[in-house]
Image: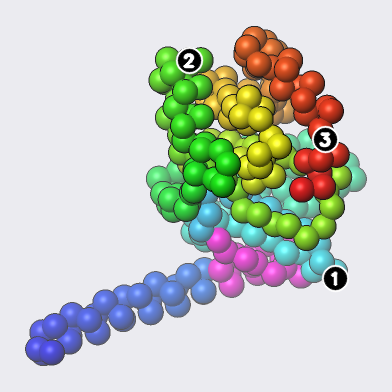
C-alpha cells in the first residue's frame, strides 16, 4: 500500500472517530439537559430510523428517551419541547400537545436528515400463492396500474396460538406490502388473498387523514372503496367462517 493511500485511509478513520466522539458528546449533553429540565434521571438512546422520531418510557425510576440523531444539535427551544413532551401527565395535556407540535415542526424542517429506507427483502412467490401475480392483476383491474409498491410474504413467527391476526400491512414511506404467511395455504382461496392485497393497495390510493389531532386510517372514502370491491362480501364471509382456522395456523 502506498504512503498516500495509507494517509488517506488514516484521515478517513480519524474523521469517522471524530464524528463518533462528537456524537457521543452531543448525546451526553442532550441527556444532561433533558435530565435538568425533567427533574429526573435520563438514559438517552440515539437512533437513525425513519418512523418514530421521538419516544420515551419510564423504567425503574429512569426516563428512557429515544430520539433521532437530528435532535443532537437541536436548539434550546426544541430541547425544552422534548422535556415538556415527556413531562408528568397530570395537568400537562395542553403543554404536551404544544411540545409535540414544536417537535413535529422541527422534524419537518430537517426531513432531509432522515436516511433513505433500506430495501426490505421480500419474497412474493409462496408455496401456494404468487403475490406478485395477484398484485399485478388487482392493480390492472381495480387501479388502472397506478399503484406502485413492492409486495411479499411476511416472516413466519410461529410458536403460539394467536387471538388476532393482521392479514396484511402497508408501509407508506417504503411503499411496501407484507401479507401474513398464514394465508399461503391451499385451504385459503386466492379470492381471499386478493381481497387482502386489494385492501393494502387501497391505502396508497386513499391515504390516512389527520382529523382533530387523530390519525384516521380507514375513513369513510376508504370503507366505501373497499366495500365496492367485487369479492369483498364473499371474502368477509369466508374470513368469518374460517377465522379459527387462520388463528391456529
> Marks 1 and 2, Cα distance to the nearest angstrom?
55 Å
| Highlighted range, magenta | 27-47
Residue 235, quarter of picture: top right
**N-term mark: 1 or 2:** 1
**Residue tagged 2:** 141
Total numbered labels placed on residues in the image = 3
Element at label 3 = helix
Residue 234, quarter of picture: top right
Q: Few, some or many C-alpha atoms within 10 Å of disc 3 (few <14, some 14-19, many ≥20)?
A: few
Q: Few, some or many C-alpha atoms within 10 Å of disc 1 (few <14, some 14-19, many ≥20)?
A: few
Instruction: Please identify, in this view, whether the residue under mark 3 or under mark 1 is nearer the observer.
Output: 3
The structure residue drawn at horizontal position 26% and vertical position 77%, both measured from the top left corner, is: 12
* 177 is higher (above) or lower (below) than 154: above
* 136 is higher (above) or lower (below) than 81: above
- Name the outermost residue toward the front: 186
Residue 191, quarter of picture: top right
Decide whether residue 154 is among the magenta residues: no
Residue 139: tell me if it is visible: yes
Cβ–Cβ under 8 Å for marks 3 and 1: no
Residue 213: tell me if it is visible: no
**Residue tagged 3:** 243
**N-term mark: 3 or 1:** 1
Which label sits on residue 60? 1
Q: Is residue 148 left or right of residue 242?
A: left
From the top left corner, tell me how far across and down residue 71 is, in percent. 54, 55
Amino acid at each position: 500500500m502506498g504512503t498516500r493511500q495509507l494517509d488517506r485511509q488514516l484521515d478517513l478513520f480519524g474523521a469517522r472517530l471524530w464524528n463518533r466522539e462528537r456524537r457521543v458528546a452531543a448525546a451526553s449533553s442532550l441527556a444532561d439537559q433533558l435530565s435538568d429540565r425533567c427533574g429526573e434521571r435520563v438514559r438517552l438512546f440515539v437512533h437513525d430510523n425513519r418512523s418514530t422520531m421521538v419516544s420515551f418510557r419510564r423504567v425503574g425510576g429512569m426516563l428512557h428517551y429515544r430520539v433521532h440523531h437530528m435532535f443532537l444539535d437541536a436548539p434550546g427551544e426544541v430541547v425544552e419541547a422534548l422535556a415538556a413532551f415527556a413531562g408528568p401527565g397530570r395537568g400537562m395535556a395542553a403543554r404536551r400537545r404544544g411540545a409535540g407540535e414544536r417537535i413535529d415542526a422541527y422534524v419537518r424542517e430537517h426531513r432531509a436528515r432522515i436516511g433513505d429506507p433500506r430495501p426490505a427483502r421480500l419474497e412474493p412467490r409462496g408455496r401456494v400463492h404468487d403475490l406478485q401475480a395477484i398484485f399485478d392483476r388487482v392493480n390492472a383491474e381495480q387501479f388502472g396500474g397506478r399503484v406502485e409498491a413492492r409486495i411479499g410474504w411476511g416472516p413466519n413467527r410461529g410458536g403460539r396460538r394467536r387471538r388476532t391476526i393482521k392479514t396484511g400491512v402497508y408501509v407508506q414511506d417504503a411503499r411496501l406490502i407484507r401479507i401474513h404467511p398464514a394465508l399461503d395455504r391451499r385451504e385459503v382461496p386466492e379470492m381471499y388473498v386478493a381481497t387482502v392485497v386489494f385492501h393494502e393497495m387501497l391505502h396508497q390510493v386513499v391515504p390516512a387523514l389527520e382529523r382533530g389531532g387523530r390519525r384516521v386510517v380507514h375513513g369513510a372514502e376508504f370503507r366505501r372503496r373497499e366495500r365496492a370491491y367485487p369479492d369483498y362480501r364473499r371474502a368477509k364471509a369466508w374470513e368469518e367462517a374460517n377465522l379459527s382456522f387462520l388463528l391456529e395456523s
